[in-house]
Amino acid sequence: MMEDEKNLNFIEQIVEKDLQEGKNGGRIQTRFPPEPNGYLHIGHVKAICMDFGIAEKFGGVCNLRFDDTNPVKEDTEYVDSIQQDIQWLGFQWGKVFYASDYFDKLYDLAIRFIKEGKAYVDEQSAEEIARQKGTPTEPGIASPYRDRPVEENLRLFQAMQNGEIEDGKMVLRAKIDMANPNMHFRDPIMYRIITTHPHHRTGRRWNVYPMYDFAHGQSDYFEGVTHSICTLEFVVHRPLYDYFIDQFADSDYRPHQYEFNRLNITYTVMSKRKMLQLVKEGLVAGWDDPRMPTVCGLRRRGYTAEAIREFINKIGYTKVEGMIDLGLLEHTIRENLKETAPRVCAIFDPVKLVLTNYPENQSETIVAYNIDGHEELGTREMTLARELYIERGDFMENADKNFFRLSPGGREVRLKNAYIIQATGCEKDAEGNITTVYATYDPDSKSGTEGGNRKTKSTINWVECGSCIEAEVRLYDRLFAVENPSAEEGDFRDLLNPDSLHVQTCKLEGALRKEMHKPEVVNGIAQCNHYQLLKQGYFVVDPDTTEEKLVLNRTASLKDNWQK
Ligand code: ATP
Ligand code: MG
């Protein structure tokens, strides 16, 4: 193999070894198995990069399998969004499968288990069954229904499926070993009754639905998966995964399960259940709220697919659980946008600046580089005239010598890409607030001319009053106030950061009017333009933008606290 391909994670090393040993006839098949009960989050992306990455690297195939065994929580809305997000991330599956495709096969398999004395119908409540599970050191207690005759089990299981039994009144359990040190072997539930909700694909056809453990391994086997990769919490399920397959497999082929550490990120939650709660209760604006760790939320926030994949690449895969600093994710998007996002002037707290020696009714065009020093990234035009907006903080009426920006009678300051100016005074309202700053400009100091080389201690941003445009800016901060909301006691919703969104307006260069408009939607995905608003951060145009109102989301501030 070539040198750059050698940078393999521990599961890829296993795959490479399996290939060298000729296992599975040289076939590599993985799957990404989301349950369509929510939108994908960045934790899922870690799994996606692993599953699809292996197929890409080793010339195999990765299929998409919807693990749709619980109609209560699943919906086609989620099926669609999951497919969109995977494609947006830049991956392509081989085939699309659904666990529900196997409901007939799994049902037949359950019947076979019953006939072979390997499964029984239990009439105890979920609580009672949980109570009898025992502990890792104490064996469990056998259900009084454990030794029902086969005929009775068959009749009852069919009654369950026929809709004759109420939800929760009976389950089908595997008859394995109530004393097994692995608790998952203590007669795990194979099937439960769900009649309350139709299934998004099979409708009302089924009244019994297989549990994860009875569906996942079998699905892998039916499809011919070679490497079934999941997260570490499934290590303890692996023996059961193997057991169920061993009971019916009619060849030597076996899918094998491998596990890696989940992705957890500080100041957020990585659970669809909790995210759904935030969405349903209106605590965020939706699954794609830019504060959410969902793929669609990150996208709306201005994260690129490239940056998200780069982040996953940076954190890598191990066999120990941990927590990743949110700062690393932010660092990655800054590094990504730094090279490409045009840098434009935006004034967040404007005060008017009048250039008293600039002729009225005159204006001129200033050509600015999108990124200074990068001609290849193009230029844009700014309009300069007598009245401008600058940041209020760039002027101080009575400043000491350590203030390098505008102050009356003070030093020379350069207007970004334009002239050198000197403040002469200001005007205030009755409350003493400064309403206008006055300055003179030096016509021989224009950037790009000979006089443009004259140095000043500082450069300030500006936009021209007549041509500038207004935008609503949404400044986002971390969603939660505490580092690890999942580790805290009590209600996670009480830990939300009350200041996670600040909305205000700003004034932007008028030339942006042409390019900042409602993002075009291609295949359901808004095509976003990224900008660096000088001194303010990276921003992206939000789909809430209308003809009347431009809306920008702050992707990340400029300050990077990330330490390697
Ligand atoms: P959640 O707890 O958010 O509902 P889940 O594990 O139930 O997540 P699934 O739809 O079953 O969600 O997950 C599909 C795949 O994504 C699984 O293989 C799962 O292991 C993986 N996955 C889910 N969350 C993470 C995470 N935080 N880090 C890495 N992989 C994850
Ligand atoms: Mg799951």
Image (cartoon, rainbow, N blue to C red):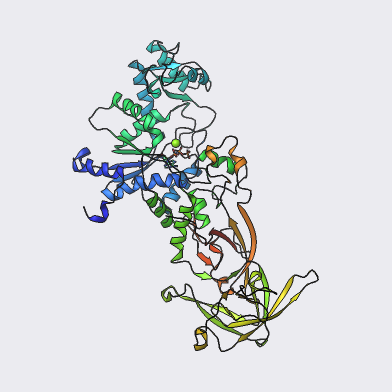
Q: Nearer the viewer, residue 253 or 270?
A: 270
Using the image, determine if residue 380 lies above or below residue 493: below
Q: Nearer the viewer, residue 530 or 250?
A: 530
Judge left or right: residue 251 versus residue 170.
Answer: left
Q: x%, y% of residue 384?
A: 60, 81
Q: Is residue 369 visible?
A: yes
Using the image, determine if residue 81 lies above or below residue 131: below
Number of marks in the rendered image: 0
Q: Quadrant of the C terminus?
A: bottom left
Judge left or right: residue 26 versus residue 488.
Answer: left
Q: x%, y% of residue 312?
A: 40, 50
Ligand 2, by image quadrant, is top left
Q: Nearer the viewer, residue 218 or 160?
A: 218
Q: x%, y% of residue 68?
A: 44, 36
Using the image, determine if residue 443 lies above or below residue 233: below
Q: Where on the picture, by quarter, is residue 361? A: bottom right
Q: Nearer the viewer, residue 94 or 360?
A: 360
Q: Residue furthest right?
A: 430
Using the image, determine if residue 165 lies above or below residue 475: above
Q: Residue at x 63, y 64 (%)?
A: 549
Q: Is residue 548 visible?
A: no
Q: Residue furthest front?
A: 401
Q: Residue furthest left?
A: 21
Q: x%, y% of residue 46?
A: 40, 46
Q: Residue at x 41, y 53 (%)?
A: 311
